[in-house]
Amino acid sequence: MAGHSDLGRFLRRCRAALAPEDVGIAPATHGRRVRGLRREEVALLAGVSVDYYTRLEQGRHTSPSAAVVEALARVFQLDAAARAHLADLARPVRRGNQETPAQRVRPAMHQLIASMTEHPALVLGRRTDVLASNALARALLTDWTLLPPRQRNYIRWIFLDPAARDAFLDWPTVAAEVVGTLRLYAGRNPDDPQLSRLVGELTIRSPEFRTWWNGHYVHERTYGTKRMRHPEVGPITLRYEALAMPGDPDQTLFIYTTDPGSPSHDNLRLLGSLVARSGSTPGTTSATRTPRG
């Protein structure tokens, strides 16, 4: 699913995404039979032979040098996330396919996010597993603590719970980006059996996931904006920051904020007051919606 079988697919996707004029090649005066750049054009720009580049795309050569990877990243005009993904796919084949140990969030971090009564916060781990969340995040999104541990996963909720489609006003953008995030993880961890099971389930159950997964786009979570509509308080536009957790690079803390004085700020405060009045404890927030699937 991931690994060197994906190197050729990723290169073909990058090649198809560029037009000749994007890389300084004069447009042809007659029709081109291929979409995007030709293999010969990529090879010339990267300074490698056509045969060598063809073998890369066909999977007959699986470990290009760092210099070749850098040259291809330059030709394809990749951003930092896509460059890192290309480098991951070009690493020598690894053998392992072992279950990774369960991730744990430090007790102090649980206490920290629980103390954030005005800001939704959650910690995502490998494969976008939801490792921790505060009451306001569960009220805003969904209460993963009500699910069996295997199903406490953000991307699984995005694609398999109809409530997630209603929650995000820009659901296609949100969903496509989280697929890109999972692709980035897959490049670094091609032998993760839990990832294989998750991708298999989503591929079968979601046509949208299948399409975006096969598109081989990657996305790195750093910061951004999400537009939501909560059934009890109305629309909320949130800004988020994604912070890497010291000691475990596969854990990311997400903190959501609103612009002071905005309607979104008022609506989020109203949601917080509903959570506070309910006397909720983790896993029993009355303002949350129980996910399906």
Image (cartoon, helix red, strand yellow):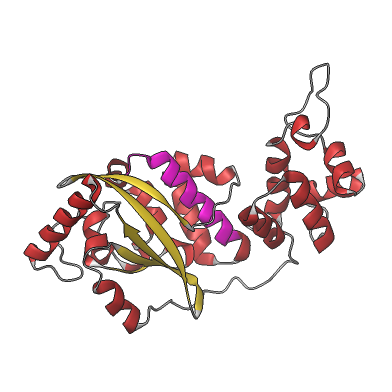
Q: Give the range drawn in magenta.
A: 168-186
In x, y percent, where is residue 94? Answer: 69, 70
Secondary structure mostly taken by the magenta-highlighted segment of the chain: helix
In x, y percent, where is residue 34? Answer: 76, 28
* Horizontal arrangement in the rendering, residue 293 relative to residue 93 (left or right): left
Indicate whether 32 appears above or below 77: above
In x, y percent, where is residue 88? Answer: 68, 62
Location of residue 256 (image quadrant): bottom left
Residue 267 in magenta stretch:
no
Residue 171 in magenta stretch:
yes
Location of residue 18 (image quadrant): top right
Indicate whether 93 appears above or below 166: below
Q: Foreground: 109 or 132?
A: 109
Q: Which residue is drawn at 68% across and 56% down?
A: 83
Indicate whether 21 appears above or below 293: above
In x, y percent, where is residue 41? Answer: 85, 37
Q: Residue at x 52, y 40 (%)?
A: 211
Indicate whether 256 appears above or below 14: below
Check the picture and name the quadrant holding the N terminus: bottom right
Q: Foreground: 19 or 6?
A: 19
Q: Which residue is drawn at 34% across and 78% down?
A: 109
* Horizontal arrangement in the rendering, residue 86 relative to residue 177 (left or right): right
Residue 3 visible, this angle: no
* Horizontal arrangement in the rendering, residue 107 relative to residue 78 (left or right): left
Residue 123 visible, this angle: yes
Q: Which residue is drawn at 44% across and 62% down?
A: 242
Location of residue 80 (image quadrant): bottom right
